Image: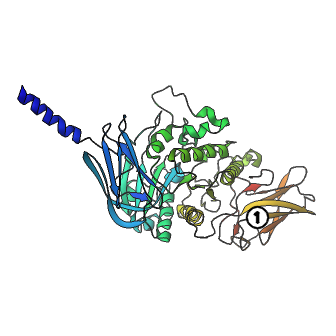
Amino acid sequence: MVRLGLLGAFLALPLALRAEVKLPAIFGDNMVLQARQPVPVWGWAAPGAIVQVTFAGQTQTTRAVADGTWKVTLGKLKASFYPQSLVISAGDTVTFTNVLVGEVWLASGQSNMEKPIGKQPGQIPCFNAEQELAAAEFPNIRIFKVEKMLSAAPRKDLEKFRGWQACSSNALNSISFSAAAYFFGREIHTNLNVPVGLIESSWGGTRIEPWTPPVGFAAIPSLAGLANPVITTNKIPNTTPTVLYNAMIAPIAGFAIRGALWYQGESNVGNTNYDVKMAALVGGWRQVWHEGAFPFYFVQIAPYTYIKNLTNYSVENDALPGFWVQQSRAARHIKNTGMVVTTDLVDDLKNIHPRDKQSVGHRLALLALDETYEREVESESPAFAKMEIEGGIAELKFKHAKGGLLSRDGQPLTWFTIAGADGKFVPAEAKIDGDTVAVSAASVSQPVAVRFAWGQLAQPNLINKAGLPAEPFSTQLPVK
């Protein structure tokens, strides 16, 4: 009996000492940790276990609380290409190797964010896909992909994912990584000369509501009813508010990032309050990340034939221009955001997945380089500022027109219409004078309103000196 008692005590002792320590799936070999800001590290261990975290000369110690959770925060790290190890000990030890320090961005949205460089069922590859993939050997860019999942409640960890790996043609192709995110990351990497970490969490055909946290909805009275959706079936529709956030964002919330990229909206065309829903999404993500108003850059959706029967088409029944205005409003109203305009990036108006994701990534990178990294590059599209009427001419003043406005193809400006008091819009002549466009039509002697790019097929030619296309607008629907 004594022997058995001693044996039991002996066996119990190592179990207590070897309190198993676990971390969320977003932590792993080959990852990139965010530079120049605090870096939370968290996980699970036995209640009361002492947890020690060591990285880059720093050591932080904490104790797991009653439910086994623990968290430490590393101090600001310097960007580094030198592979280091993140070591977490709590009796046993977890070691993550080949860890770099640099710039980390989250990319999310629906199919135009999800679209890879190469083949995707039902889609055409990006332009020059083979050459782009062949040239995609960037060992200091690291990619992580969250796989599609739904959940009725916020999950503590990811169930399906493709872990951190160095960027290569094989890695991009094998996991069908986001082309827009990759092209963005490539420019950040080459311009800043730092490691870059890219996290993709996207799902084609999804609406904005499922990606939004309950706290985001709750902060906006008109949307508060969406914060706690009633889910009555075992099979959760992916249109249900919060269910994509719960499964695909909540488990990584808090992993230190520089900012987020968003390309979504096609499934919400027809909404009259998308700008408010954007505020809920952005505000909610910022709240659960606890990083303050981190940068949030998004893509205005592209021209596309949403109304298929063009024989009976009427611009007054076209929801896309009004939706563009809502996206512009979101960019104006939500702090530390920016929007990419894509009216010039469509080669086939019947293809909802434009192939030029290189330019999308480039324009997102311009916003980050300018606004986040303070590189002073021209990053914003011309935007309507004010209108003055003189005689029969509407003088339109534009912002973000440094150096003057231009016609992209050298031809007369397109997609301007003008209306008088009767509200009937007719095609207009538009002429550039510096950062102003003079708009008129012979049949409208006293103009009261102007529209630009007001239609689902709009591919206008007005640009600024940086080559960025002007935002669609109606003087009747101000974005301020």
Q: Position of residue 218 (x, y in %)?
A: 60, 36
Residue 283 or 273: which is nearer the viewer? 283
Residue 459 or 244: which is nearer the viewer? 244
Q: Is mark 1 on a helix, strand or loop?
A: strand
Whether residue 137 appears in this view of the structure is no
When the figure is inspected, residue 408 is found, relative to residue 449, above or below; the finding is: below
Residue at screen point 76% across, 64% down? 398
Q: Name the residue under label 1.
A: 398
Residue 379 or 459: which is nearer the viewer? 379
Please give left or right for residue 237 compared with residue 162 in the image: right
Residue at screen point 26% across, 49% down? 93
Q: How crowded is mark 1: few (under 14 residues within 10 Å), some or many (20 or more)?
A: many
**Rendered-image quadrant of the N terminus:** top left
Whether residue 418 appears in this view of the structure is yes
Please give left or right for residue 375 compared with residue 32 in the image: right
Q: Which colour scheme is used?
A: rainbow
Image quadrant where residue 410 sits: bottom right
Residue 266 or 254: which is nearer the viewer? 254
When the figure is inspected, residue 258 is found, relative to residue 243, above or below; the finding is: below
Please give left or right for residue 467 compared with residue 183 in the image: right
Q: Where is residue 86 in the image (x, y as percent from the top left)?
A: 33, 56
Residue at screen point 78% across, 72% down? 434
Specify the amino acid type for callout 1.
Answer: Phe
Q: Position of residue 272 (x, y in %)?
A: 70, 42
For the image shown, how many numbered marks are present on the structure? 1
